[in-house]
Amino acid sequence: MVAVSENPDQGGSKIARIATAVLLAVGYAVLLSLGFVAGIVSGLAASWLSWLWQTGSLGKVVAGVTLVVLCGLLFAGCRAAEWGMGSRIGSALPAAGWVVAGFTLISVSSAGDIVMTSAVINYGFLFGGIGAVVLATAVSSAPGPGSPPSDDQPTQNWNSA
């Protein structure tokens, strides 16, 4: 049996709070980075959707289905990040990274090159992906950090006997 200290201001709990805060900050930074990397990689892979779109009606069907599956995976990934971190910001950070990556891909570089061109399927990829990650963040059910617990969530009272 583990003894619980009556005074929560002792050194052990302070170290635990600091370690938890550091772990959360690292987790959030990783989620933001993963969202950005996923946005860049999927944006570069979206060129295959453009190629498929130009191959005819069967190619358009395959590209459209692939786009819907990709948007579903983006939605599920943001929801999984929210569930893993236990907060709304867990879904918002990879979503923000993905959106920034998407806008990076459509911006013009100093040499005048762009990665994502103005094809219908690319617009679907960009705006459908943004819609998926925004929706995943908007429908998140986890309370945000520092939010008071709702009535249906049990709270732990360490001070009661």
Image (spheres, helix red, strand yellow):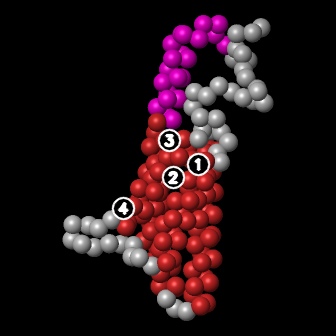
Q: Please state the horizontal and vertical placement of residue 11, each as a whole percent of the image.
A: 51, 13
On whether residue 18 falls in the magenta region, the answer is yes
Q: CA distance from mark 4 to mark 2?
A: 14 Å
- Residue 95's disc is 2
Neighbor class of circle 3 (other Cα within 10 Å; few <14, some 14-19, many 20+) is some
- Residue 137's disc is 1
Name the residue: 65% across, 39% down: 142
Image: 94 above or below 40: above
On whether residue 21 falls in the magenta region, the answer is yes
Residue in front for this viewpoint, 81 or 17? 81
- Residue 104's disc is 4
User: What is the span of residues highlighted in magenta in the rendered image?
Assistant: 3-24
Image: 59 above or below 118: below
Dot 1 and dot 2 residues touching (CB under 8 Å): yes
Q: CA distance from mark 3 to mark 2?
A: 14 Å
Dot 4 and dot 2 residues touching (CB under 8 Å): no
Q: CA distance from mark 1 to mark 3?
A: 17 Å
Q: Earlier in the sequence, mark 1 or mark 2?
A: 2
Determine the main secondary structure of the stretch shown in magenta.
helix
